[in-house]
Every structure is written in C-alpha cells, then in structure tokens.
Image (cartoon, rainbow, N blue to C red):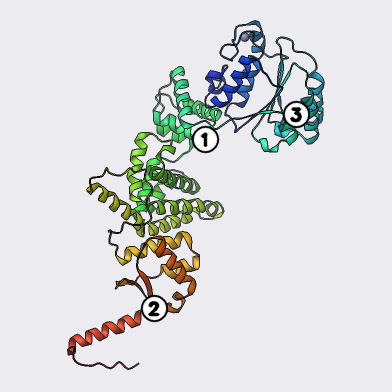
Amino acid sequence: MASLYRKFRPDVFSSVIGQEHVTKTLINQIETGRIGHAYLFTGSRGVGKTTCARIFARAINCLSPVDGSPCGKCEVCKALASPNMDILEIDAASNNGVDDAREIREKVNYPPVNGKYKIYIIDEVHMLTGSAFNALLKTLEEPPAHAVFILATTEAHKLPATILSRCMRFDFRLVSVDEISDLICKVYDKEGKTYDTDAVRYIASAAEGSVRDALSIADMCMSLSNGKLTYEQALGALGGVDRTKIRELFTAISSSDVGECFRCVDDLAVSGKSMGLIAKELTYYARDLLLVKVSPKLLTETEEHIAMMREDAERSSVDFLSTMITLFSSLDAELRYSVSPRIVLEAGCLRACKLAVTDISALEERISRLERLAQGGALSAPSEPARSVPPADVKMSPQMVWGKVISYFRLNESARLQTLVGNHTDFEVKNGEFIVWCGDDYLDFNDKAVLDALDRAFALNGIGYKIRIDKRVERDKDKELERLRAMVGKDVKINVIK
Ligand SMILES: [Zn+2]
C-alpha cells in the first residue's frame, strides 16, 4: 500500500497547503507565459518544495493549463505523467561531483522530447562541490531557450552568491498546525479512518510544520490503531508525554506541594518517560501559559485546552513563568550529562517550588483583577500583560515587598547578591522606612553594590519606602529598654552602659 504521503501528494497548485505566497506567483508566471530559466526553492524539509517544482515543471509544458496547473488530460501531460526525458530530477546529495554537473551541461542542449521545456530539478543543491557549482554556473549563465532549472535546498545560505544571483528565489514557510490538522482530517476522511480531533491536532503539532512528517506520523498512527484513533494512541505512537500529567506536575510546583511533585515525577518515570522529555514538556507548558497571559493568539491549542490553561496561568505571574522557562530549559544540558538525571529533575522541581512560594506578583495580579471587577469593569482580559508596578492602594506587607525584591534579584542580579539578600527574613516598616534587620552579615549587607541593587529593585517595583539596613542587636536593645520602662515606669531614667 502506498504511503499516505505519496498517495496524497498534490498534483495541482490548489492542493498545496501553506505556500500560497509561492504558488500565486508561479501560477501568475504560467498564465502570463513569463517563465524564467532558474528558480531557487528554499525552506525546511517536507514543506512542498519538490512537489511545487514537479507541478510547475508539468504546468509549463501543458498544452492547456487549468488555473495555472497542469490539466492532466492533454498528450503532453499524459507523456510526462510517467518517467520521461523532459523532467529530470537529480539528487545533488549523491550526484555532487563536477562530472555530474558537466553531464547536465552537455545534455541540456538536446531539445525536449514531448513539450516546450526541459526541466532540471536539482534537490539538496547545497551539497554540490565547489567545482560542480562552477560548472553549473556556466550553464545558468547561458542556458538554451528550452531549459529551466529548479534548485531546491534546505540551506540556501550554503549556496555561492554567484548562483543565488542567477535564480528567482522562493522561500517556503513552515505550515501551520491548523492547516496540517485540516489536511490530516481530509486524508483520514478519504481513507475512512475515524479519529479524535485531539489526536489529529497532536500529530499536526508534532510534525513541527512539515507536511511530509505529518503524513508519515498519520500513516504510522493509522496502522497502529484498529478502530477510532484516540489521543492516547497518538501520544503512545510518538512516545510523547500526556499533557494532563504535565499539568498535574506544574500545579504541584505552583502550589509548592513538594510531595506531590515527587509523586508526579515518579508517575511519569514509571510510564517510561525520560527526565529530559519531562523537563522539555514543562518548559513548553510554562511557555504556553505565558502565551495565554500575554498573547493567546499565538497558541496552536484548541479552545478547550486554552480555557483549561487559563486557570493555571491565573495562578502564576509573568515573572514566575519566565523564571520557570529559564530554569527547566537550563536543566536540559545538566540532564544530558548527569549520571542520575532523576535527581537533577527533582532538584529542579524543588527549586521551582521554592520560587513559587515567593511568587507575590501572581497574588497581586489576582487582587488587581478582582478590584477591577469590583469597580464594575469587565473581568480580566486575561490577555492583558501583568503589570510590574502594584496599584498604589494595595497595601503590601513587608514580607510581600521583600518577595518582590527577591524576584527582582533572581532575574537581574549576580549570584553573590542573590545569596546575600536571599537569606534575610526580618523586616519592618516604620515611619516610611523599610528596615532590614541583619545579624553578623550586617557589614557585607552594607556593601555599596548591595545597596545600589536594592535601590534599583525598589524603584523598579514602584515601592515608595526608603530602605534602611540595621543591626538586629540594636533593635533587640531598644525593645529590651521598652520592656524595662514598662516594668519600672516611664519616669525612671535608665542608663545604658556601652
Ligand atoms: Zn495538460
């Protein structure tokens, strides 16, 4: 049985998906009869370069093209439908020498047998050697009137400028998840295969923009499932991680539930998922949540999934999510070389849990949303980006202020300053001053770099207090004096001996 990709390979431009910007120009050239001698088709693998080259090659020879595509009925179309001497496909990966290029140069002079043009489609043209390029260039400089060259490549930057300057260039783009999903649905419908839309969407997003990959995966999934193709089957076929499991893990992290984190990691490990894959999926999930918050239009998920993600997104701030992305994507290298990747991942989750505790911004975002609601405004365009400056009327506790300072340090300051500032837990707000009470590290803490960084953190978060750093002992002494005064009465003078 022919593979789905071969079976459903388009033979007219209107069936090519995702490349309208290319096909429109090509059709226009066919309709006006202004055919060039050299074309360059560039773009990722499996997006339709060779397919378009083949359609174009037959269309320019067709006696009566229909909407710029070959009619498939005239004698030329019929002759070109089977192997012929007019449309020649050369794979430059295996024919990359100067002799191959010379052979093209000699043979190109023989006129076409069936139609008007003789077409050379050279695939992976960047694989040609330097001398082969030179030989090809000579042909491109003075081609016979009947010759058309279509060079296809995934790596146009590897071509010499002399070749590039001779070609009309067409950039093929990656095909969107929506377009690929539609295609798979159509193909499955024609094959009489039933499916869950979730499964199809999962296949489409796994193909990362390549139609060929999408149809190969669709093919594989079709042979694996007998009845209706389910999301779980598609997931299993590709060895992917179930989004609901990743969601569970993420919820555990954002609610700082360490025990639940370990359980989720164990659950995923038992089902055979590698730690690298879990870290990658967590990164993607955090990124998607960030998109839900700032730019939901860019998401390729279904409405249903987006609604679900909105709940998770609401619990986390933009700061927290971007830190999650940095954290889990940086784990990748560590996981690759670690002898115990599971511990690396678990430690990463713990770090994330700790960060979640100080995710004050999320709380503020929710408060300001509720406030807007209370004022009669519409509840939350959730698409609105989080604001880093808290509204003036939200009174923050010293702990909340410090949480903001810590998040700022984590994202912007050196590791030394992060540790110095991170260990402090004792604060007070008094007469418009924010006082940080310190122990023995008081001197370090008065370091100019620390003070400057703290000023920046306060200014950036729109916190109006002046910062003061003081010795914890001093405060204890003051408190002790107050206690003594209360005991003996206000009028008694107390001498403190230093
Ligand atoms: Zn025709």
State how far apart marks 3 and 1 are (Cα). 29 Å
Residue depicted at x 66% and y 36%: 155
For label 1, the crowd category at 10 Å Cα-Cα, with few meaning under 14, some 14 to 19 and many 20 or more, is: some
Ligand 1 resides in the quarter of the picture at top right
Residue 241: x and y in percent read: 44, 41
Q: Nearer the viewer, residue 373 or 412?
A: 373
**Amino acid type for the residue under numbered disc 3:** Asn
Tell us which disc is closer to us: 3 or 1. Answer: 1
Q: Position of residue 56 (x, y in %)?
A: 63, 19
Q: Residue under label 2, please give it.
A: 439
Of residues 53 and 339, which is closer to you in this image? 53
**Separation of marks 3 and 2 at Cα, in angstroms:** 75 Å
- Residue under label 1: 208
Q: Are marks 1 and 2 in contact (CB under 8 Å)?
A: no
* Label 3 sits on residue: 95
Few, some or many residues within 10 Å of mark 2 (<14, 14–19, 20+):
few
